Structure formats: structure tokens, C-alpha cells
Amino acid sequence: MAYSGAAYDYDFALFEPRRSYVGESDRDVSGRKKGSGSRTGTSKSRTGSKTSKAKTVSEQERKRLARAAKKAHEKRVKTGLYALAGVAAALLITFMVAGGVQQHEYTQRIDDANAVLNELNNDYEALRVEYETRLGASAVEEYAVNNIGMQKVQNSQITWVTVEKGDVFEVAKPTRGIFSTSSLNDLLSYLA
């Protein structure tokens, strides 16, 4: 039996005792064999047993619904966890790819800077060799002979001097002049 109201729909069949269908066991909801027990009881006892059957059915139905709700909740939680793990994995992969791209860019910059450094080192070596050749002894000698007209010293131009005594020094005698310590007359006589 169903009831349809303006805002709510009820199915009262959930609250009625369960009926057996073809192929079901011959036991009722309470677990007793159908047809067993006394049917000769008072009307109160029959009503009481129907009420207890209805309570048992509704409790069983409520437990079944609770289990179904719990399973649905567990399924939603699992689905949420799987979705969260998927998002985390996607973020991790995205960061790894971005890090790899950034690492490749930095590696490329380092390689370019090393190429420029090698080129500058080669230029430095070339300039250093050129500098040494321009300022070397042979370059100076060549410039002196060709451009200035100088000649190389010959052995006949070399005079060797030998000193018989060791190092000797003499104290110079004071001279008369503008820098001597004589009187004013000496200065005037020097100027005249």
C-alpha cells in the first residue's frame, strides 16, 4: 500500500509483515515454521504477534538500509580517496615535468656560458702569444735594427776595466759657490 501526499510519498509496504513468495522457504520472518503455533489464541495475542513481526521486519529493514548506507558511504570515501590520489599523482607528474624542463633550460644556459668561456680563453691565449712576440727580446732587437738604425755591439767595442784596489772612497773638499756655508761677503763676491 502506498500513500502519495502533496509533498511526501510513503510506501507503507515496508512496515507490513513480509509475505512468502514461490520458491521461498516455509518459514516466516520470525524464523518459525509457517502454520506452526496455535491459531486459537485471543485476538490480542494475534495482534501482538503481528506487531512483533512488523517490528522485526522494520528492524531488519532498518539494519539492511543502514548496512547499505554504510557501504555507499565507504564507496564514496574510497572514490574520494582515489580521486585525491589521482589529483596528487597528476600534480606530482606536472611538477616533475616542469622541473625537468627548467633543468634542461638551466643546462642549456650553462652549456652556452661554457662555450662563450672557451671562446674567450682561446682569444686570451692568442692575444697573450701576440703580446709576448711583440715584446720579446728578438722583436725588440729587430725593431731597434730596422726602425731606429741601431747596431748590435761588436766585441771590439767592449772595454774591460780592472781595479787594482778594493772599493775606495774619498771625501770631497768643500767648494766655494752659491751652496757653500761662507759669509755674506763670499756671496756678494760670487755675484759680482
Image (cartoon, grey):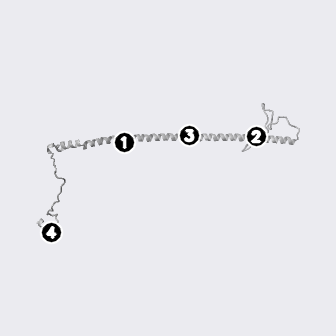
Secondary structure found at label 1: helix
Specify the label residue 184 is tagged with.
Answer: 4
Does residue 128 appear in the picture of this structure? yes
Give the quadrant of the N terminus: top right
Distance of mark 1 from mark 3, alpha carbons?
41 Å
Residue at image x 42%, y 40%?
108
Asked if marks 2 and 4 touch (Cβ < 8 Å), the reply is no
Where residue 191 appears, as percent x and y from the top left, is 12, 65
Residue identified by numbered label 2:
60
Specify the label residue 89 is tagged with.
Answer: 3
Q: Earlier in the sequence, mark 3 or mark 2?
A: 2
Marks 4, 1: nearer the viewer: 4
Where residue 58 appears, as percent x and y from the top left, is 77, 41
The amino acid beneath tag 4 is: Leu
The amino acid beneath tag 3 is: Ala
Secondary structure found at label 4: helix
Specify the label residue 117 is tagged with.
Answer: 1
Structural crowding at the residue carrying mark 2, measured as other residues with C-alpha within 10 Å and reported as few (<14), some (14–19) or many (≥20): few
Q: Earlier in the sequence, mark 2 or mark 4?
A: 2
37 or 135: nearer the viewer: 135
Secondary structure found at label 2: helix
Give the quadrant of the C terminus: bottom left
Distance of mark 2 from mark 4, alpha carbons?
146 Å
